[in-house]
Each structure stands twice: as structure tokens, then as C-alpha cells.
Amino acid sequence: MKHKGKVRYAVVGLSHGMEHVGVALKNSRVEVVAVCDRDKAKTKQALAHVRDAQGAEAAGRIGAFDDYRRMLDWGEFDAVVISTPVMAHKDMAIQAVKARKHVLLEKPMTVTMAEADELRAACKGSKTVCQIGYEVRSSQMVRRVTELIRSGKIGDVVFVWWHSFLLCEIRGWRSERKNMGGKLFDCCCHYWDILQLFAGARFHRVSAFGSRQGGIGPNADQIPSVATVNFEYQNGVKGNLSSSEISPTPEASLFGVVGTNGIIYGNPWRPEGAGSLDCYTEGCLYREQITISGALASRGHLGFREQHEAFLDSILQGAPVVCTVDDGYEVVLLNTAVDQSIATGKVVLRDDLARG
């Protein structure tokens, strides 16, 4: 579906949603026309910020809501950014799709596969855009790695990995395993999404171990503070993601892509907050060091601004959706597989989950 002029945004869930509001206010193709949160103080604060940024002329068109259903009934917007806790994603997204609104839905798409199936069914045949907020996909760093892989300079990919070691405190709804909380499920889902892109195939099976510090054996309900996950993809590529949320480190996030003719080492943070690569290509004959400019790309939150550009391109120009509901479904499958493997100590097959 194509529109003329600016895309009118509504943003719901203003704890994280204010970051979306901030990006939207700097985009010449967007007008923020509504904000929504159950916390009226957050709504009032967001409303004042939007009015200050967009000027007096636009002020009269801005709606402030503490009820999502009322905002949908009002309906004076083209697209809604849903940035609420994941437990509310499915219902809110389905309601928006039925109201014929474009949707940018924060990740994870849903908590359960049943919810994901319901959302996929609601989106089937819809003429509106529904994009899942795996923004790292849209980052300049991932685009550059993908270009290097496709060039053949590192040969065929045989192994991919990501390490996330940091010290953090998990609060609120993210502190519960049933909500896919903790860094492993709420944050590392970005990374197994990207690893699957780098591998070039969907996962075939998963083996995962995760527990509190010092724990061993199956873990059915605690959020793992230390974990490791092994992937086998449908094309034979192998992969690993290792995570700790109790380890202060100078390099909180590192990744790699191993080929038959070279290797890529990546750092999403250094030196300018937008990523850097150390690439050995053509049998390691050449070494190329690449730094993504923090002044030109999303700094610190990779791809966050670029995901909005992709969303707008899909709405205004009919461009392919950068992260579809089906892509989001794959990550729900991965979250479920990792959760089940940690809970049971068993290998989990994608086909068994998909059939279930």
C-alpha cells in the first residue's frame, strides 16, 4: 500500500516507546500524531515532547490516550509502533491489522508459538505492512557482513558464533522466564536471528544449557544467568551463542563468521558505537578492517533508526518488508527450542516444534 505525504505515527508503550518517538520526530517522512500508555504521566510527558518538536501547527492534531482500544477507535493515524511488554503484542497487533493500520511490532513478536500462529493467520492476506522490530537486521554492520558473505571472499560459511558477556540487572516483566525474560531470551534473540541470516538457512536442531551461576542440569523455570546454545542449520552450518549477564567485560558483544576461505570477526560496539569488522579473505591473503561511522549509522542501538527507514520504504514505496511476521515466527521457534532444551536437557528439532 502506497501513501502520499508523511506517514502518521501512533506510538503505544512509552517506556521503550519514547526511543521510537525520538527517532520519528527526526524523520522528515513521519508525523507523530498519537501517543498511548496506561501511565498518564508518561503520556503527558510524551505529548509535551512531541508538541515541542513538531510545533504549534501540528499540536492540535496530536492525540494522547491511556487506552489502546480508544486510540484505535479514534484512528487518525496510518501506522502504529507497538512497544509494550511482549505479553500484549499479539492482541494489540491483531487489533491494529484488523483496523487496517501498518504495524511496527517490537521484538520478541510473541511469547508462545500459539500466539505467533494466531498473529500470522491475522496478517495473512493483509494489505498493510507488519514489520517485526529486529532492528539489528537493518544495521549497516549486518548489511556489510552480508555483502562480504555473498561476495564469496570467505568461501562457504561453515560456522557462526556470537558471545554476549555483560553485567546487568533484569527488572519488571523481563525478570520472569514465562515472559521470555532475561538477557538470553529478551536480548540474545536479536543475535540468533542474525546468526541464522549469516548461516543462510533455518535452524534444524538446538542444544542448550543455561542456569544460575554454578547450576547444572535441566532448568525448567529460572532465567539463566549463564548459558550456551548450539545450533545446527538446515544447510549443515554449525553455530553457537554464549551468554552471561553477571560478567563485567570490556567487550560485551563479539561475533564471527567462519568460511572455507576466510573469517570475519565483528564487534558491534567498537570503536564508534556502530560496529567494526576484521576480515580475512581469499585464503587469508588479505586483511580488511572496516569501521562503521557512528555519526552516520545508529550508534549503540544498531539499526534502530534504519529499521524505521525500511518500514517507511515498505509503506510509501512498496519495498519488501525487512523483517516479516514469518521472520519473527522463526525467532519464536528459536526461543521455544532454546527454552525447551534448557528445561529438559534434550536436543530440540525445528520440525517437531513446527508440526506441533
Image (cartoon, rainbow, N blue to C red):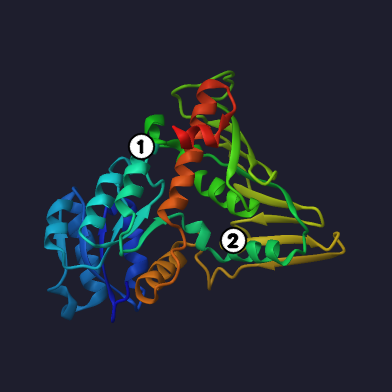
Secondary element under disc 2, as helix, strand or loop, is helix
167 w.r.t. 65: above or below: above
What residue is shown with label 2?
A: 142
Q: Earlier in the sequence, mark 2 or mark 1?
A: 1
Question: Which residue corresponds to the image point at 59% horizontal and 49% vertical from the top-left?
Answer: 196
Secondary element under disc 1, as helix, strand or loop, is helix
Q: Tell me if 97 is positioned left or right of 190 in this view.
A: left
Q: Tell me if 281 is positioned left or right of 206 in this view.
A: right
Q: Tell me if 79 is positioned left or right of 209 in this view.
A: left
Q: Label 1 is placed on what type of residue?
A: Ala
Question: Which residue corresponds to the image point at 24% horizontal and 68% vertical from the top-left?
Answer: 78
Q: x, y percentage for residue 91?
A: 25, 45
Residue 198 or residue 12, whichever sits in front: 198
Question: Which residue corresponds to the image point at 32% horizontal and 75% vertical from the top-left?
Answer: 2
Mark number, residue 169? none
Residue 119 or residue 210, whichever sits in front: 119
Q: Residues within 10 Å of mark 2 (few under 14, many from 20)?
A: many
Query: Which is closer to the viewer, label 2 or label 1?
Result: 1
User: In this view of the protein, can residue 183 be seen by the observer?
Assistant: no
User: Can you say which quadrant of the picture contains the N terminus?
Assistant: bottom left
317 w.r.t. 247: above or below: below
State the count of labels: 2
Pointers 2 and 1 in contact (C-beta within 8 Å): no
226 w.r.t. 216: above or below: below
290 w.r.t. 346: above or below: below
Q: Label 2 is placed on what type of residue?
A: Val
User: In this view of the protein, can residue 342 be seen by the observer?
Assistant: yes
Q: x, y percentage for residue 315?
A: 35, 71
What residue is shown with label 1?
A: 114
Q: x, y percentage for residue 241?
A: 62, 40
